[in-house]
Amino acid sequence: MSTSRTHGFDLHRVRPSGPDTGVTVIYLHGGAYTSEIVSQHWSLIGHIAARTGHEVAVPIYGLAPDHQGLAALSFVTAVIADLVAEGRRCYLAGDSAGGGLALLAAQAVSGEAGGVVGLTAIAPWLDLSISNPEVDLIEPHDPWLRRPGLRPLAAAWAGSLPLQDPRLSPLFGDLSCLPPLQILVGTRDITLPDCRRLRDRLPSSIPLTYHEEPGALHVYPLLPVPEAGPGREAIVTHIQAGTRMTRP
């Protein structure tokens, strides 16, 4: 792994053994926009690199309250632009808050040459306001996430912007410009209602691979649970399918 300082933040690049495929998977870690990357993220990143043969780039975006959403989006889109300028194809992936940021980045760069060839979102945070009334039905069964704890974090990330600004909450952005999309979410996860809403709003022209894991918790492919293995393999399969045309 190599680390560089670019656009004011660290960028790690994990390069597996074997020939360069010309593809970079950009992985954006979760943590409610306030927590640093942890070992579970690195485990999945290593798995993706080893199983796909692709380089994985990990932008370490600034966190609230010292940093806010627009700055993170600017950083990630600059990383994409740099990689495209190197002649690389980019595939975006992320979990929870990072999954939301990955969707925002895909929306932001949709018109640029090279663009993004695919996207995997693991239980993405799609609406910072968490205002979907269907959350009421899921929250009692989610042992991890609660709206009273998340709302102050969302406010710190948004700063002076409305929580549903489409540059912060991708559910309200342009869904017609997304690349082939994969969503994985558990049924005991308060992100589930908005994942369903995204699924239902997505234009039919956007290829979607959507999976709900019965009884699974938030970001289950990162957890030490039986369903994580199949979840990881589904992620690898989608990345391989979406990037096959760009491999030598």
Image: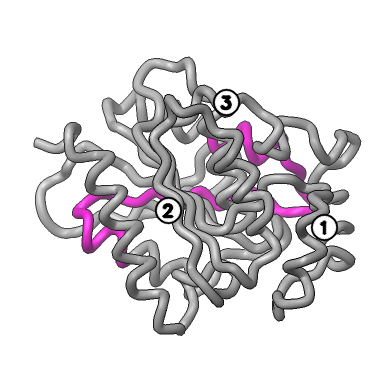
Asked whether the beta carbons under mark 3 and mark 2 sit within 8 Å of each other, the answer is no
Q: Quadrant of the N terminus?
A: bottom left
Q: Can you tell which of label 1 and label 2 is closer to the viewer?
A: 1
Task: Locate residue 162: give its quadrant.
Answer: top right
Q: Amino acid at mark 3?
A: Ala
Label 2 SS: strand
List the residue tagged with mark 3: 108
The residue that appears at 83% across and 64% down in the rendered structure is 147
Can you give x and y, in whole percent of width and height, for residue 134 in the image?
Answer: 77, 56
Foreground: disc 3 or disc 2: 3
Q: Is residue 112 magenta?
A: no
What is the distance, in whole Å, between disc 3 and disc 2 at their CAs? 22 Å
Name the residue at 45% across, 57% down. 211
Residue 237's place in the image compared with 42, above or below, is: above
Residue under label 2: 12
In this view, 91 is above or below 155: above
